Image (tube, helix red, strand yellow):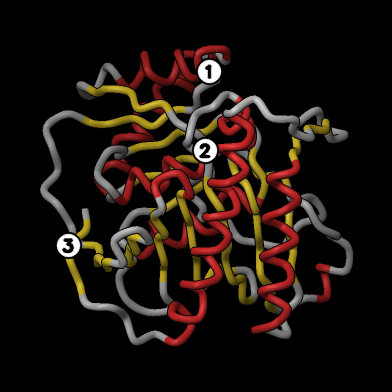
Amino acid sequence: MFKAATAPQDPMILQFVPILTQACEILREEYQQYCSGAVFDIETKKDDSPVTQADYRVNTFLTQALAEISDLPLLSEEGKQDGRDEWSAFWLLDPLDGTKEFLHKRPEFTINLSLVTGNLTTFAILAIPAQQLVYFCPEQGMPLKYDIQQNHWYEYTHATQEDIVHVGLSQSSQKKPKYATYLESLAKFTDFDEFKAGSAYKFCMILEDQVDIYPRFHPTCEWDTSAGQCLLERIGGGLVDFQGRPFSYNQRETLLNGGFIAYKTKDMKILAFKALADMQDSN
C-alpha cells in the first residue's frame, strides 16, 4: 500500500515525471480514439502478437525523450534489438504492455521502462495511463507512486497480510490447463481468490495489496518483467523462475523468458512454491 508523501528530490525521478506524463497522455488519447471506433492501424507481428499505432507512437516519443536525457542505448520491443551483447548498461522499454487488453477495451495496459546495469535492473518505472498513475522504483529507497491528475506523491509502506490470498492471473489463463492445475494444488494449502488483469498491470496490483502471488506459465519477454521485478524486490518480494532464481537481463541470445512466480512477501513465495511442487508431483 501507499501513504501520502512529499515530492521526491531524486533528480532522475523528477526528470522522468514530465516524460511519463506526456507518454501516458499519448496512450490515453490513442485508447479513446480506438474505443470511439475511429480508424485505427493494427498489424500482426511474426509471432502473431498484435502491434498498433499506439505502440509505435509512444515508442517514438519515448525513444526521442530518452535520447535527449541519456547517452545509454535503448532496447525496445518496438525498436532495433541488435548489438545488445556489447552493452553494460541500457534502457529497456515496452511502450505498450498489454496490447491485447488495449484491443479488448480493457484499461489494464502499462508503460514499462527500466534501467539495466550489468544484468540487474537498478531503476524502474511502471505507468498505468488509464488511471494516470506512475510507479517509480528509485535507485535507493522504497517505491513511489505519482498521481498525475492530482499531482500527489505516495510512498510504499508494508501492510498487514490479509487472511485470504490474492492470486493474479492473466485474462487468458482459463484457456491454459496449467493454471487450473496450479490452482488445484494451491487450494490444498490456502483459501484464495483470483484477480485477472493484463500482465505488468498485476505487478502494480501487488504493490497495491490486490495481488499476493502471480504465477506465469506462458511466455513473456525481458521488457515485460524487468520493471516489475525491480519494484517487487524493493518491497521484499520478487520474481523468480521455477528453480527459485531471480531473472537476470541481457544475458542470453533470446529475450524470451521462461515461466516465473512473482510474489509480494517471502511467506507468499514459500506458499507459491508449495503449490508448484505439489503440481509437479501430480504430473
Q: Quadrant of residue 234?
A: bottom left
Q: CA distance from mark 2 to mark 3?
A: 25 Å
Q: Give the percent coordinates (x, y) of residue 99.
A: 64, 36
Characterize the local packing of mark 1: few (<14), some (14-19) or many (20 or more) Cα atoms within 10 angstroms.
some
In this rendering, position of residue 176 left or right of residue 192 = right
Instruction: Answer whether residue 139 is visible to the viewer in this image.
Output: yes
Q: Which residue occupies the foreground of this view, 263 or 54? A: 54
Residue marked by disc 3: 3
Residue marked by disc 2: 199
Q: Give the percent coordinates (x, y) of residue 54.
A: 69, 45
Instruction: Assign a secondary structure to mark 2.
Output: helix
At label 1, the amino acid type is Lys
Residue marked by disc 1: 178
Q: Earlier in the sequence, mark 2 or mark 3?
A: 3
At label 2, the amino acid type is Ser
Q: Nearer the viewer, mark 1 or mark 2?
A: 2
Q: CA distance from mark 1 to mark 2?
A: 17 Å
Q: Earlier in the sequence, mark 1 or mark 3?
A: 3
Instruction: Assign a secondary structure to mark 3.
Output: strand
Q: Residue at x 77, y 76 (%)?
A: 87
Q: Give the percent coordinates (x, y) of residue 220.
A: 64, 40
In this rendering, position of residue 120 left or right of residue 154 = right
Instruction: Answer whether residue 242 is visible to the viewer in this image.
Output: no
Q: Earlier in the sequence, mark 1 or mark 2?
A: 1
Q: CA distance from mark 1 to mark 3?
A: 37 Å
Characterize the local packing of mark 2: few (<14), some (14-19) or many (20 or more) Cα atoms within 10 angstroms.
many
